[in-house]
Image: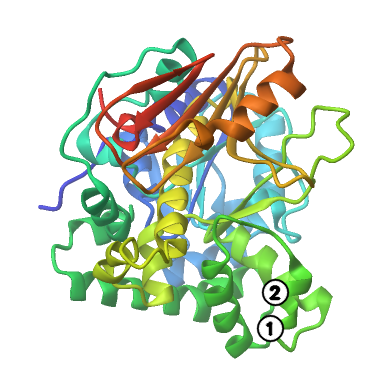
Amino acid sequence: MAQEYTRWQIESVQRGLQNRRVSVISGARQAGKTTLVRQAAGKGGVFRTLDDKTTMMLAQQDPREFVKNRDETLVIDEIQKVPDLMPEIKLAVDKDNRNGQYLLTGSANIRTLPAISDSLAGRITHIRLRPLTQGEIMGCRPQFLEMAFEGSFPMQIKNYDKEAIFDLAFRGGYPEAVRLTGTAERKQWFSDYIESLLERDLRDIENIRRQDALQDLVKILASWSSKYMDNAKIGAKMSLTKQTLETYINALERMFIFEKVPPWIKTDYEYIGRKPKLYATDTGLMAAILGWKQADVLNSFETADTDRAGKLMETFVFQELAAQVDVGHYDYSLRQYRDYKHREIDFLIERTDGAILGVEVKASSSVSKDDFASQIWFKNTIIKGKMPYKGLVLYSGEDTLSFGNGMWAIPIAALWGE
């Protein structure tokens, strides 16, 4: 029997069932939504999946009858396939204010789908499920952000050098891929996954006419991970109109293959940048799309060509951080900083009380004071003591090192270590 992982978001789903009439779990295909639903709802719910052609046909023919619900929780899997169900669910919960009536899943972000116009505001809670984090795989709690804001770090974490971390990044977090032990088998799984996604699932949310262009765009965006968005440069590599390019990028975001991190702009500093930063949502899938080999990325350190290593490490850290921000959704927001003076901070995590955690990512196993230059400038010039600020550099070494003034070098493995 395949191993089932306890997901960090299970408590969010359970709270949603207790406190809202409708709960929606959104995330990429094969991220584990169905397993999470069964764990959270137990045996008390009625489960219907729209992946089943007969079930989907019944939902399309009579959506009002399909969503009829009595005392149990009705689980509808892949709700984006029949958007006409949403107005009927709204009518149902407007007549009955009982909590926990519907638990929906979607492999597309239903809040951004044009076909689903009613937000069910006040009646619904949205829960994001990402591919597995390293912490979930190991059975650890999501405590890094709390630990970091408190300044409580492990003094040393062994057995996670560059090679070990790259191994985790190449594996990715899709449960099926994690269970595979062979590199060739995992590579084939990723290839089949992205092919199925582009050829089948995108049809549910967008009319994609240029399949060849979409496949090219996926590779371009994968290579763009950890970079600031520039549609003009991306479009220059493709024969697509500006509108078509934006439509395709938005479709891939809705399918949770790529994600943008918005800029932190709470300042009157005139040189601040306002471009979002793009990330692939799974490093295993990203590496497979780009045709990377783990040995080549590791050997790039010897040739000083570390662009791939840096991209892989930063994207991996993004995925781990974003999942922990999701769990503490009402406590944290994830941003990034860049200005026109070439000062950058990979991630800024702001807590609801105004405290800020800056995070820089380094693939190497050594850190110097120069690696904190942007964060020291940001703290002294932008923050100016108006709110607490801690600055971290996450790196592939073993030791926690203090650089003074609230600046710390922390092993990347602290993201999941307890």
The three-letter amino acid code for the residue at tag 2 is: Ile
Report the residue at 71% width, 47% height from top.
Answer: 342
Position in image of residue 302 (x %, y %)? 30, 64
Q: Which residue is mark 2?
A: 234
User: What's the residue at 78%, 72% (across, down)?
Assistant: 232
150 to the left or right of 165: right
- Of the residues shown, which amino acid type is indicated by label 1? Lys
Element carrying mark 2: helix
Residue 97 found in image quarter:
top right
Q: Quadrant of the C terminus?
A: top left
How many labels were placed on the picture? 2
Residue extending farthest to the left is 1
Name the secondary structure under disc 1: loop
Return the residue at label 1.
237
Q: Where residue 204 sits: x, y (%)?
A: 60, 70
Q: Nearer the viewer, residue 397 or 153?
A: 397
Relative to 170, is 104 above or below?
Answer: above
Q: Residue at x 63, y 34 (%)?
A: 374
When asked about the image quadrant of residue 376, the answer is top right
**Structural distance between the alpha carbons of marks 2 and 1:** 6 Å
User: Is residue 282 in view?
Assistant: no
In front: 303, or 206?
A: 303
Q: Are marks 2 and 1 in contact (CB under 8 Å)?
A: yes
Residue lying at 70% horizontally and 58% vertically, measured from the top left: 113
Q: Position of residue 85 (x, y in %)?
A: 64, 54
